[in-house]
Image (cartoon, rainbow, N blue to C red):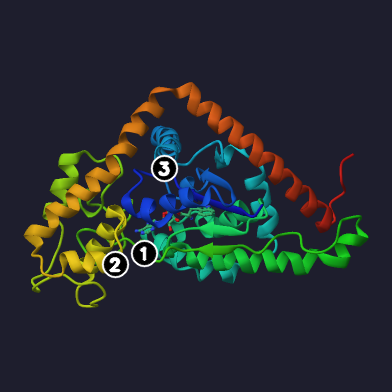
């Protein structure tokens, strides 16, 4: 069975961008692929973090995966730091990663600038290597992510290929290995709609956890009133009618796309329904559709967080399954890299 792997960082609250760009699509893949969904807590320490908050966000993010429909009879859900192979593989991969590949990453350049350049941590630089490790450890075929992860995915593919070339094939066979490729080369799965949900206060910036204003995003756990208020106050324009794909109307395209997904309608249906609407008519329609879509998730989330033992059991079983696959990959790489193997 082919495998799909993905993850969300437990930093702050999970928002509509994370949901529409990633988690909602994970749920659709569970029947077709073996899926592993990770709460990537090691990634969350690449920027200065609040220790109490990290622990809470890790638990909350796990509960939200399940509330959004990740089904543990089909998928494995686990915390990255519970599977030690992630950190270890990252170190091994670092030795095959040219520094230049990491220095040119867009997210590294943006985040390190915010951290004051030279003060940014080494782990911010090696962040994409850790992400590559998360993926290649599981011999992953597909990685369902939003558009902002495209560059990281490219790096993961290049790195997997490089390690295969450096250590795989005949050289590995001579060391007693199976030969051939050590890692599968993963493919990104980026949705047609929802791959880049934009901020509610600026249609040219993506919705993000780190934006200072909470008005700029819908968090999955926002109350009905808060959702209605955020939509009521979100940025719009003064054109007549509503339309998709007009570069001069990024907010309009974004809000219609969000409506399209949460209402379950096609683009044509949304165009037909909304083309003559004013913002005053459309905004309550969007707010209601969002509330209706998120309400069942919020109810399930409450139920799941009330049963801590259940959540811990899910995470523990998920980590066991992940460790089983990860250790096999790590064993192969150790062998292929020429480490003296323990009996
Ligand atoms: P993170 O935590 O920033 O985001 C989690 C997922 O949400 C998607 N996303 C969005 N999609 C659409 N519109 C948005 N505004 C938006 N904001 C975020 C992201 O594309 C992502 O799919 N490096 C990753 C986490 C990671 C990972 C992995 C992912 C670590 N290891 C292995 C896949 C496989 C990140 O920071 O995602």
User: Residue at left 43%, top 22%?
Assistant: 307
**Residue 206 percent across, percent down from the top left:** 31, 62
User: Where 214 sits versus 21, above or below?
Assistant: above
Counting residues from the start of the chain, the first of labels 1 and 3 encountered is 3
**Residue 313 percent across, percent down from the top left:** 55, 26
Residue identifier under label 1: 193
Element on which disc 3 rests: loop
Q: Are marks 2 and 3 in contact (CB under 8 Å)?
A: no
* Mark 1 Cα shell of 10 Å, populated few (<14), some (14-19), many (≥20): some
* Mark 2 Cα shell of 10 Å, populated few (<14), some (14-19), many (≥20): some
Residue identifier under label 3: 49
Residue 299 lies in what quarter of the image? Answer: top left
User: Residue at left 11%, top 71%?
Assistant: 241
**Residue 168 percent across, percent down from the top left:** 80, 64
Q: Nearer the viewer, residue 37 or 33?
A: 33
Q: Nearer the viewer, residue 102 or 159?
A: 159
Say which of marks 1 and 3 sits in front. 1
């Amino acid at each position: 069975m082919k495998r799909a792997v993905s993850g969300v960082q437990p930093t702050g609250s999970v928002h509509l961008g994370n949901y529409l760009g990633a988690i909602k699509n994970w749920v659709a893949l569970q029947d077709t692929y073996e899926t592993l969904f990770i709460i990537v807590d090691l990634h969350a320490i690449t920027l200065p973090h609040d220790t109490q908050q990290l622990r809470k966000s890790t638990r909350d993010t796990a509960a939200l995966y399940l509330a959004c429909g990740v089904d543990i009879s089909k998928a494995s859900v686990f915390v990255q730091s519970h599977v030690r192979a992630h950190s270890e593989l990252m170190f091994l991969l670092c030795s095959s990663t040219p520094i230049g590949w990491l220095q040119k990453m867009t997210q590294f350049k943006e985040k390190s600038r915010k951290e004051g350049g030279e003060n940014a941590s080494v782990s911010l630089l090696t962040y994409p290597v850790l992400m590559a490790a998360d993926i290649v450890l599981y011999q992953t075929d597909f990685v369902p992510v939003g558009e902002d992860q495209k560059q990281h995915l490219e790096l993961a593919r290049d790195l997997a290929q490089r390690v295969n070339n450096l250590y795989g094939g005949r050289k590995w066979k001579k060391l007693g290995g199976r030969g051939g490729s050590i890692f599968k080369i993963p493919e990104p799965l980026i949705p047609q709609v929802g791959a880049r949900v934009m901020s509610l206060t600026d249609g040219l910036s993506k919705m993000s956890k780190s934006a200072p204003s909470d008005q700029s995003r819908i968090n999955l756990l926002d109350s009905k009133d808060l959702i209605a208020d955020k939509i009521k106050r979100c940025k719009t324009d003064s054109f007549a009618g509503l339309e998709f794909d007009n570069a001069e109307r990024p907010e309009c395209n974004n809000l219609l796309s969000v409506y399209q997904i949460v209402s379950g309608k096609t683009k044509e249906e949304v165009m037909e329904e909304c083309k003559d609407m004013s913002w005053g008519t459309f905004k309550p329609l969007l707010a209601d559709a969002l509330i209706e879509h998120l309400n069942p998730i919020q109810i399930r989330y409450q139920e799941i967080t009330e049963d801590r033992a259940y959540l811990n059991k899910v995470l523990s079983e998920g980590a066991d399954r992940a460790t089983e696959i990860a250790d096999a990959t790590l064993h192969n790489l150790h062998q292929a890299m020429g480490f003296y193997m323990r009996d």
